């Protein structure tokens, strides 16, 4: 890994964080004084990925055009890291006609055929889909790979185990990624999962499994590099579990009364930690960090403005671009 790699990953993490920070502000901006989840420019639920940037950035650094990602209900970090257009994604979140799905999917149902990106609000739903995509890639004879992302709670779903088994049997080019943020909504990991590392479950299907601790983007980068190389060379699937951090609630409006760790959350934030590490190594200056943040803010501001200025669907649009 080079200094340029590290700087690029830091830049992408900041870009994602600034996006999530602004969406957080926009989402809450018109839902007061009385909280109404259906009100405002961004109605409905909102699941933000602040704190989980290392998982997306470390994995997506190895992906190329034609590779696919199936993401969960907390998808923005993987979408942006994989090259999904920020303007179109933001317009989708705002429910506008210029959105990825003409404003009909919202933030949990982003679909981008150009970048082979999709996500779903159904727990572990993307794992079987990823197997299908990987099978298509294998039959076409390409070296493309699929990344299937889900949270640690999804590792207890039948779709997780069925998908790992099928991927192993068919030797598919798929990388299963579990984001362990310690909380399946409000349920702590130890109350729902018998083992301490879902990476250990990979052995049951005869595939490699690795757990990355400390929300370390460089460790994710190394683990993902090995898994992607393995898949591209025809050696089959791998499993990576990243012990990451959910800085915010499960959804916006979640009071998080169930979390005893809230007092230590800010000190575990991966972005200032990585910035300090890069500065100590002489690979990042304060001025560079300021420029990176300013560039991210400008891009995000433009995306928000694009969404706000875009048309709202008309009632006549309701039956367009949908299955009848």
Image (spheres, rainbow, N blue to C red):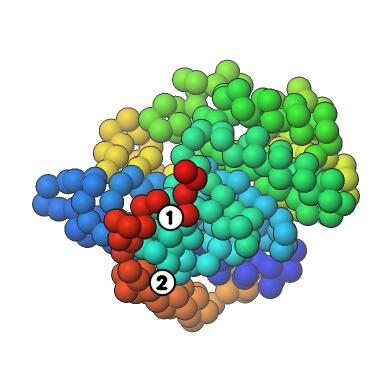
Residue 203: x percent and y percent? 77, 26
Q: Which residue is mark 1?
A: 320
Q: Decide if residue 314 is on the left or right side of residue 240.
A: left
Mark 1 → mark 2, Cα distance in angstroms: 25 Å
Q: Residue sitting at 71 percent across and 45 percent down?
A: 133
Image quadrant in which you'd find residue 81: bottom right
Residue 194: x percent and y percent? 58, 18
Looking at the image, which is closer to me, 92 or 153? 92
Q: Which residue is mark 2?
A: 303
Q: Residue sitting at 33 percent across and 45 percent down?
A: 45
Q: Decide if residue 175 is on the left or right side of residue 112.
A: right
Looking at the image, which is closer to me, 229 or 125? 125
For residue 185, say whether it is visible. yes
Number of marks in the rendered image: 2
Residue 245: x percent and y percent? 48, 44
Q: Residue sitting at 35 percent across and 71 percent down?
A: 310
Say few, some or many: other residues with alpha carbon within 10 Å of mark 1 (under 14 / 14 to 19 / 20 or more). Answer: few
Image quadrant in which you'd find residue 152: top right
168 over 270 or under it: above or below: above
């Amino acid at each position: 890994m080079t200094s340029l790699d590290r700087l690029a990953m830091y830049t992408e993490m900041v870009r994602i964080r600034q996006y999530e920070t602004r969406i957080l502000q926009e989402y809450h901006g018109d839902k007061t004084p009385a909280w109404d989840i259906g009100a405002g420019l961004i109605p409905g639920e909102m699941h933000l990925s602040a704190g989980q940037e290392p998982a997306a950035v470390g994995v997506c650094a190895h992906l190329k055009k034609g590779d696919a990602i199936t993401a969960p209900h907390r998808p923005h970090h993987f979408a942006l890291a994989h090259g999904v257009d920020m303007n179109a994604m933001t317009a989708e979140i705002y429910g506008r006609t210029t959105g990825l799905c003409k404003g009909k999917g919202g933030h949990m149902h982003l679909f981008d055929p150009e970048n082979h990106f999709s996500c779903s609000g159904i727990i572990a739903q993307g794992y079987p889909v990823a197997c299908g995509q990987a099978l298509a890639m294998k039959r076409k004879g390409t070296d493309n790979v699929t990344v299937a992302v889900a949270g640690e709670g999804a590792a207890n779903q039948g779709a997780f185990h069925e998908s790992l088994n099928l991927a192993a049997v068919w030797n598919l080019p798929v990388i299963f990624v579990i984001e362990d943020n310690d909380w399946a909504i409000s349920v702590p990991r130890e109350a729902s999962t018998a083992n301490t590392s879902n990476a250990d479950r990979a052995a049951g299907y005869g595939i490699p499994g690795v757990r990355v601790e400390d929300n370390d983007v460089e460790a994710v980068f190394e683990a993902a590099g090995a898994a992607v190389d393995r898949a591209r060379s025809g050696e089959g699937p791998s499993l990576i579990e990243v012990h990451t951090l959910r800085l915010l609630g499960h959804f916006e409006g979640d009071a998080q009364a169930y979390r005893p760790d809230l007092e230590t959350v800010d000190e575990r934030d991966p972005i200032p930690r990585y910035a300090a590490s890069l500065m100590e190594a002489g690979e990042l200056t304060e001025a560079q960090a300021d420029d990176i943040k300013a560039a991210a803010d400008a891009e995000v501001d433009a995306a928000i403005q694009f969404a706000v200025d875009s048309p709202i669907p008309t009632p006549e649009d309701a039956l367009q671009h949908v299955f009848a």
